[in-house]
Image: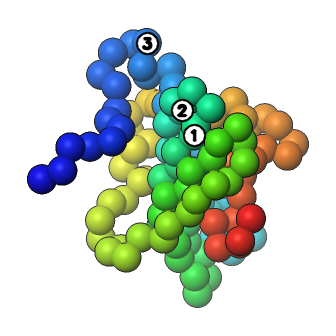
Amino acid sequence: MAKPEITLPLNEKGARNIFVGQGHFIAGESLYIRFQNGPYSYLLYQGEGRGWAFKGLAVYKNNKLINKKECQNWNSFDLYDILNYQIRTDPALELYDSPYSFDPNSNE
């Protein structure tokens, strides 16, 4: 098995760079967990609604989306379980134009 490129930190200092965010829409909701490493943010996201669903990974550099991949295996993870771990709410959600409150199905 290949060595992981990034892992979740186990100490208090590392936990300061992990955030969770939720979005609610008329016909659905989304959830993400964001890991920050310097100018990079990595988002695992999941969302579902009436007739649609998505899961994937998005990578940002300096708040600009640089890569996005949709999951091929829908059973690979369920982010809603992460809400049980009391991870801090993403402070970026307080911004009107937060780069992380995006529609993962868009090309932006």
Q: What percent of the width, then of the height, locates residue 27?
A: 68, 74
Q: What percent of the width, then of the height, locates residue 29?
A: 62, 63
| Above-or-below relation of 42 to 87 | below
Mark 3: few/some/many CA within 10 Å (<14, 14-19, 20+): few
* Residue visible at 12% across and 53% down in the picture: 1
Q: Earlier in the sequence, mark 3 or mark 2?
A: 3
Q: CA distance from mark 2 to mark 1?
A: 4 Å
* Residue visible at 43% across and 53% down in the picture: 80
Query: Which residue, given by chain and number where applicable, does mark 2 sit on?
Result: 36
Mark 2: few/some/many CA within 10 Å (<14, 14-19, 20+): some
Q: What percent of the width, then of the height, locates residue 96?
A: 87, 42
Q: Amino acid at mark 2?
A: Gln
* Residue visible at 48% across and 53% down in the picture: 44
Q: What percent of the width, then of the height, locates residue 70?
A: 48, 71
- The answer to whether 80 appears left or right of 63 in the picture is left
- The answer to whether 44 appears left or right of 12 in the picture is right
Residue placed farthest to the left in the image? 1
Q: Earlier in the sequence, mark 2 or mark 1?
A: 2
| Dot 2 and dot 1 residues touching (CB under 8 Å) | yes
Judge by depth and name the residue closer to the eye, 4 or 86. 4
Query: Which residue, given by chain and number where applicable, does mark 3 sit on?
Result: 13
- The answer to whether 27 appears left or right of 97 in the picture is left
| Above-or-below relation of 105 to 62 | below
Could you say whether the residue bearing mark 1 is in a helix, strand or loop?
Answer: strand
Query: Which residue, given by chain and number where applicable, does mark 1 sit on?
Result: 41
**Quarter-wise, where is residue 25 in the image?**
bottom right
Could you say whether the residue bearing mark 3 is in a helix, strand or loop?
Answer: helix
Mark 1: few/some/many CA within 10 Å (<14, 14-19, 20+): many
Q: Amino acid at mark 3?
A: Lys
Q: Amino acid at mark 1?
A: Ser
Could you say whether the residue bearing mark 2 is in a helix, strand or loop?
Answer: strand
| Above-or-below relation of 71 to 96 | below
